[in-house]
Image (cartoon, helix red, strand yellow):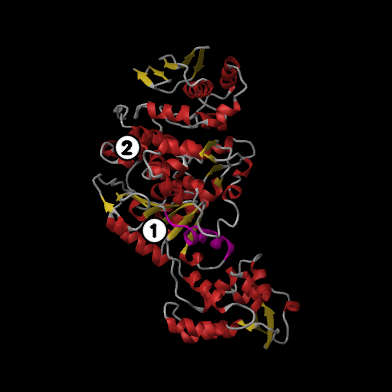
Amino acid sequence: MSNHIPSDATSPRERAWRSSAVTLSDMEVFVFPDLIYALVLANIMSPRIWRWRDDPWFKNIDRAKPNRRIQRLKQYIMDHYVFNLDLNTWGLTTKQREIDRFKDFIDTDALQQSNALFGYQGDKYYFDIDIRTHFGLDKYEGDTIPYWKTETVEAMDAFKFKPAMQTGAGECVSLSTLYAAALFIIARIPLADIFLMATPLHSQNFIDVGQGILTNNRRLVTKTMWFNGTEISAQARRALENERVTLVAHETGVIHTLYPEASIDPEAYRRFTSRLRRFLHTDFSEQILGNFLRQHGGMQRCFQIRWPINGVDHYIAAERVFAYEHNSSFRFTDGTVDKLMADIEHEEFHPSPLPHRMVFNEWQRFVRENKIDLRRGDDLKRLKSRFEGDCMDADMTLQALVEFCHTEPRLPDAASKNFDRAAPPLALQPEMTRDDVIAHLECIRAHNPMAQAAFYAYRDLNRCEPQPFLRAALQRNPVAVDALSDKPADAMAETLRALPTASIYDEPARLAQPDEVWNFQRGIGIEKAVLMANVLHARDPQATLSIKIDEDDRATLNGPQGSWSFPGVKTLKPQTWRLTPEITVDR
C-alpha cells in the first residue's frame, strides 16, 4: 500500500473536482465528466465485486463464451440489486445553490439546455407532463432538486439495511458503473470494449461484443431484443430515441457535449459510433413488420391474421394474438408461432375475414417478395401505398416504421472537438489481480485524471488527503442534518453511539459519508464523529470544530458546546482535523 498523500490542491476548480469525486452527484458528474469513470475504477478496486468470483453462480464462468458470461452476470445483478430513485435517500438541494457552486466552471445557459433538473425539456415523450411532477418534485418548493448521488458498490449493497429493502439498490449511473466494473472483473470483458453513455435522464453502457449489447439499469438489451417490439424493449429504447447523449466515457477518456476538449481516443470513439449505429439499425423483414405491430398496439386493430384450423382458413383479430403473448413464452414473430396459435381458444377465430381489417399474412408475403429497403425512396413509396386506407394514417405509419428500424443516436460531435490525450492510458487488463490493478492505478494517478479521481471516489484516506472528503461531508449531506435537527448535542452523540459500530466499507481507511452512516444506521467512531460535526456545522457554520484521531481506537469531536468521543476508529494515522471555517489537517 502506498503512503503517498497528495497535498490539498489550491485551485478552486481542483478542490471542487476532488471533493465532487467523493459525493458523485448527478450535477457533479455532469460538470466533471471524468468522474463517471472514476466510479468505475473505484468499484474495480473494491474487494466486493472480486468476491463475486467465489460465488457458485460463477463456477466455470471462464470456460463460457463472452455472451454467455455477460448473461450470467446479468442474472446475478438482477437477483441482488433493484433500481432505486427515492428522492429522500440523499436529500435535496436547490438549483441556485448548485449553479452558484459551479458558475465559474460551466456556462449556466448551456447547463439549462443539457440537464433535466436545470431547464432541459428533451423530446415530447418525456415532457408531456411537467418535469417536476415526473420526478416527484412537485411537492417541494420552487427550485428544489434532489442530489441524486451515485453509489459505490458498498453503498449499493448497504441498501439491504434499510427497512423494507431485501437486496442492494442503486440509481441508473450506479448500475451502469457497477456493470462496467463487473464486466471487467467477472465476465473478463476488456475495458476497451466497454463504453459508458449518459443522457440528461439516463445512463447505460454499450458493450462491443458480437452485435453489441446495451446495459439498461439492471437488464441487458441485445440487438435482437432492441427490435422485438416488447414493452421491456420499448422502455429500453426511450433514452436513445428521445434524448441526446451528453457524455461518452471510455478507458481512454471522455467526450462531452458541452466541452470543446475531448480526452477519449479518437479511433476508439469512431469505433464506438460505428458499432452503436450498426446496433441501432435493422433491415426490414416480415419478422420486423410483426415486431413493429407488437410495439405499436394501436395499429393492431387494423389487422387480422389468417390461420388454418384443420385445413380450413380462419381469421383472428391481431390484438387478440398479441394479447396471448403476454402470458406465454411463445411469440407470433418467431419459430414458436405454431405453439402460440395452438394455445389460442378456438372461439377466438372466425370462419370468414373480419370486415375493415387488412390480412397481415398478405403484408408478410409482400415484404418477403419485394425485399423492401427503407433507405430507398421508391421502396418507401410502394410501402406507403400499402398503408393507404381508412384505418391508419399512411404517412405517420411509415414514419413510425422507419423510426422503429433505425435510431440515429445524437452523440457528441467529434468534428467539433479538440482531442487531447496527454494522459497515459489506464492499460488495465482482465488478467490482472485486484492488487495489480490498485498498484498500477497508483503508478499512473499523478498523470491520469480518471485514475487520480478514482482514489477520491474510493474514499481511502490513507491514499488521499482528507480535505475533499471533509468538504463533501460538511457541505452535501442534508439527510442526517434534517433527521437530527431537534436533537441536543449530547443526545445526538448518544443516538450515534447506539448505532452498530460497523462501516459499510470493508477496508481499513475507507470512510462512509454522514448520510451513508445515517441512511444505513451504522458506522465506526470516526464516521459518527464526522456525521455529528456535519450537523453541528449546519447549525452554526462559523463555529470552530475539530476531530482528533487517537492511537487508542477513538475519535473525539470538540466544539464550543463540548467534547464527544466515539470508539472504533479505522487504521488512520493519529491526526487532528480542524473543520471550520477553513478545513485544515494537523498530522
Foreground pick, 499 / 253: 253
Q: Position of residue 137 (x, y in %)?
A: 59, 44
Give x and y (percent) for residue 70. Answer: 45, 55
Q: Residues within 10 Å of mark 1 (few under 14, many from 20)?
A: some
Residue 92 lies in the magenta stretch: no
Residue 405 shows in the view: yes
Give the quarter of the figure containing the N terminus: top left
Left or right of residue 396: residue 506: left
Position above or below: 557 against 326: above
Report which quarter residue 577 is drawn in.
top left
Disc 2 or disc 1, which is closer to the eye? 1
Q: Which residues are magenta?
A: 230-245
Q: Residue at x 31, y 46 (%)?
A: 428
Q: Specify the quadrant that holds the C terminus.
A: top left
Estimate the spatial distance between the alpha carbons at disc 2 and disc 1, rounded to whole Å. Answer: 27 Å
Examine the rendered structure and indicate whether residue 124 appears above or below residue 347: above
> Few, some or many C-alpha atoms within 10 Å of disc 2 (few <14, some 14-19, many ≥20)?
many
Q: Inspect the image, locate mark 2, and give the three-letter code of the amino acid beneath it.
A: Gln
What is the x, y in percent for residue 18?
Answer: 37, 34
Q: Residue 298, percent across and down?
A: 63, 71
Q: Which residue is mark 1?
A: 411
- Residue picked out by circle 2: 452
For the residue marked with disc 1, what is the amino acid?
Leu
Residue nearest the viewer, comparing 334 with 100: 100
